[in-house]
Image (cartoon, rainbow, N blue to C red):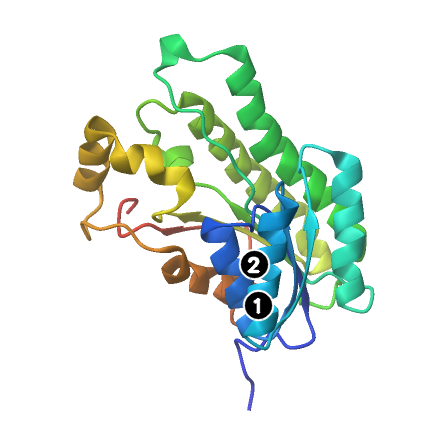
Amino acid sequence: MRTYFDLTGRSALVTGAGAGIGAGVAEALAAAGASVLVTDISGDAAAAVAARIRDAGGKADSAALDVSSREAAETAAAQAAALGGGALHIVVNNAGVTSPAMFPKLTDETFRLTFDIHVMGTFHVTQAALPHIPTDGTGRVINVTSSAGITGTLGQVNYSAAKAGIIGMTKSLARELATKNIMVNALAPLAATPMTETIRTNEKFAANMMNRIPLKRWADAEEVAGAFVFLASDAASYITGQVLPVDGGMVM
């Protein structure tokens, strides 16, 4: 009998995995049997998550990774592939930053930083990983976008533009890699993490956000991590070029 969600024997690279959604995803992939390279701009944070995975009986290593650096991305991709005997099956582009401000107060510096991490980071890591991704139907690229990239949001023109860029990248790359039997999808999660702290604690932003969430609550990172396991698994072998919101019904 086929086991759809078993990732045993597969390797994964997760960026921005030192905390929040990235950490939850790394732990969920490991729990499903994958060998995971936990990466983060903070090497110590990544190492702590990897240690937690190993303590729970999973397989994990860690590395410091600044996704804005092509050289660092290439090193991380090779390290992750080594966990899979030379193959890198699952790439999760999760690294991100936010610099919220109303449009008149946005600066060139914060706009470029947002694009460098979200868009260029996804580009660097995916391109570095591609030579290692198998073409037997187990290869997955899972990008992290946001409802902000679909519907827009107050005070985050830079973030919304970057996340919309990731959607375009996902759909175009899915078409290119379909001939290689590599699935490329995106998730648009919403969770209570350090990155969303500003919009959860700012009275104006928090009220606006809660009014947009039909379930009237924030998820935790572990609650959205299962959707990543789904897209990484054999259950998603005929899904590509899609954006899956995991946001309590905010995007319908």
Q: Which mark is residue 53?
A: 1
Give the percent coordinates (x, y) of residue 19.
Answer: 49, 50
Q: Is residue 192 left or right of residue 45?
A: left
- Disc count in the image? 2
Q: Is residue 83 above or below residue 104?
A: below
Give the percent coordinates (x, y) of residue 1.
Answer: 55, 91
Q: Is residue 72 left or right of residue 243?
A: right
The residues tagged by marks 1 and 2 sit, at their Cα atoms, a distance apart of 6 Å
Give the percent coordinates (x, y) of residue 240.
Answer: 55, 55
At x 55%, y 50%, the residue is 18
Q: Secondary structure at mark 2?
A: helix
For the residue pair 222 and 147, the one nearer the viewer reads as 222
10 Å crowding of disc 1: few (<14), some (14-19), many (20+): many
Inspect the image, locate mark 2, and give the three-letter code of the amino acid beneath it.
Val
Q: Secondary structure at mark 1?
A: helix
Residue 126 quadrant: top right
Q: Is residue 6 above or below residue 37?
A: below
10 Å crowding of disc 2: few (<14), some (14-19), many (20+): many
Inspect the image, locate mark 1, and give the three-letter code of the amino acid beneath it.
Ile
Residue 250 quadrant: top left
Give the percent coordinates (x, y) of residue 195.
Answer: 42, 39
Residue 109 quadrant: top right
Q: Which mark is residue 192?
A: none
Q: Which mark is residue 49?
A: 2
Q: Are marks 1 and 2 in contact (CB under 8 Å)?
A: yes
Do we see residue 251 in this rendering? yes
For the residue pair 250 and 14, the one nearer the viewer reads as 14
Q: Is residue 131 left or right of residue 23?
A: right
Q: Is residue 235 above or below residue 79?
A: below
